[in-house]
Image: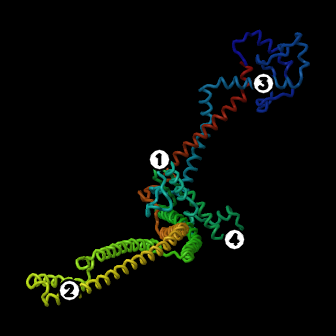
Amino acid sequence: MFRPNESEDNRRQVRANAPLRRSSSAGSLLDQAGPDTDEDRARPLHRSERPEASRPDTAPRTEASYPSASFGDDESSALEARLQAQWQSVTQIGIGHVLRWLQRGFLLIVVMAIIGAVLAFGYATTTTPRYTVYTDLIVDPSNLNVTPDDLTAANPQRDSQLLEVGSKLRVLTSGNVFRQVIRDQKLTEDPEFFKPSLLSSLLGSSGGELSQDQRELAVQRALEERVQASREERSFVVMLSVWTADPQKSIRLSNAIVEAFQAQLFQSSSESAGRIAASINSRLDELRASVTLSEEKVEQFKRDNKLQSSAGELTSSRISSALDTQVLDAQQRLIQAETRYNQMRSAVADRRIASATIFDSAAMTTMRGNFTALEQQIGAMTRTYGSRHPRLVAMQSERATLESAIAEEADRILQQARQDSEQARATLAQLRNRSDSERATVFTNNDAQVQLRELERDARAKAAVYETYLGRTNQISERQEIDTSNVRVISNPVAPKTKSWPPSTPLLMVGGTIAGAAIGTGLALVFGLLGYLRNARPRYISA
């Protein structure tokens, strides 16, 4: 690099060695800008252009060795010297140079400013104006809870809810929503959205009539450029912006997009419920057949094992319980009959037939009364008339007859008691046999009932599943007709007072003038710098 404070002797030394290292074919950017002059050829070398003798060789070289340098080294040294001169010139640029360049390019700046103003005016008068309307919606991630066990459960986590809102935000600007708006608002017939000549070139049409799908696709692309939707940070509020060339059209499109968005959410929910209902219905027939088969197995098992039940209890168990009760009653009756029979036998053996109350028939009661009265009469007559009175003999004969009748009645009652005892014993034995038989049946039925309960449990489980599926299918079918999407409009679109783009014509012209002047200023500085660099070598040599 050139150093201004370098000694004059060194500069002379470098200047003397320069002709030996210069190549006749070398050239720089400055050489291409203008022809070389004698002054250029005689310019001093920079100190950085060291002669070959300055290189660390094993033996010192003299000036006579310079003419033998290679052609490539001479060209590189010359280029380095020219670039060094240009850099030295750049470092000497000051504010005065900049002001002179701006003064020389003043006309260019004015012309560029006028061109910028004209272009801005033309853009303002030819560009289609944009009228933007805004709609604010609350997109709640939790749907309305119509039933306690709805198809989709709300996620309580905040991040998951925000993701759900983000998904619904994407639905708001989806192709399905836009296509529905295009059909509802007939945008394929609107020249603002559909321009046949331009669309033909974009879609590669050969000039023929475009199909309806192509027209809708083109309008959808134009509509996508005019619609934007964004969500406020950490909230469920979504802002929808729509612009067209007409304020009222912007409002209509914004409302149509919101309605199509809500309809799309309802349709998506309804289709999901329909798919689930169809899947469940495909299983209902199979479940119904399985339940019927299980119930038939239960009934067939009951018939095969002669199992009858009433009020949840087997009939054999109830019969066995009743027989056990009857056996107990029969035992009580047998005990009573045997006790009565033994008491009668004891009374007969002790000759207490007339006084024993165990003989309790009606005839016995009457004869006892007569016998007691007769005994009293006999006693009275014996005391009055003596034991040989004829009347007393007749009464004694009557008493003997009565005693014989009492004995016969007692014997009859005794035989009846014996028969009752035997009958009670026979009844008890019969009841015990039946009870034992029924008890064996109960044991067999209990073993069968274990298998029966297993079959009934299987049938009940399948019936419960079938009833659950059937009820769920009916519920889902009704759910298809209910809109549970929780989307509310909190700010309706309002017609804007001014257009959102482009800005007003005066403001746009001012901006165009400033931009043109800035471009002109930049060009003036660039042209001034190029001219300054072109003259860098002569200035440096003269210095």
Q: Secondary structure at mark 1?
A: loop
Residue 36 percent location from the top left of the image = 80, 27
Marks 3 and 1: which is nearer the front? 1
Q: Report whether residue 501 is seen.
A: no
Marks 2 and 1: which is nearer the front? 2
Residue 315 shown left or right of residue 523 in the figure = left
Given residues 242 and 289, the one toward you in this image is: 289
Q: Amino acid at mark 2?
A: Arg
Residue linked to disc 3 = 80
Marks 3 and 2: which is nearer the front? 2
Q: Secondary structure at mark 3?
A: helix
Q: As displayed, is residue 264 above or below residue 514?
A: below
Given residues 273 and 526, the one toward you in this image is: 273
Residue linked to disc 2 = 399
Residue at position x 72%, y 18% from top?
2
Are circles 4 and 2 on residues that touch, CB within 8 Å? no
Residue at position x 31%, y 82% from top?
411
Q: CA distance from mark 2 to mark 1?
A: 126 Å
Q: Secondary structure at mark 2?
A: helix
Residue linked to disc 1 = 234
Q: As displayed, is residue 164 above or below residue 220?
A: above
Q: Residue furthest left?
A: 384
Residue 52 percent location from the top left of the image = 85, 16
Residue linked to disc 4 = 208
Residue at position x 90%, y 15% from top?
65
Q: CA distance from mark 4 to mark 2?
A: 149 Å
Q: Quadrant of residue 10?
A: top right
Q: Secondary structure at mark 4?
A: loop
Give the position of the C terminus as an image quadrant.
top right
Q: Amino acid at mark 4?
A: Gly
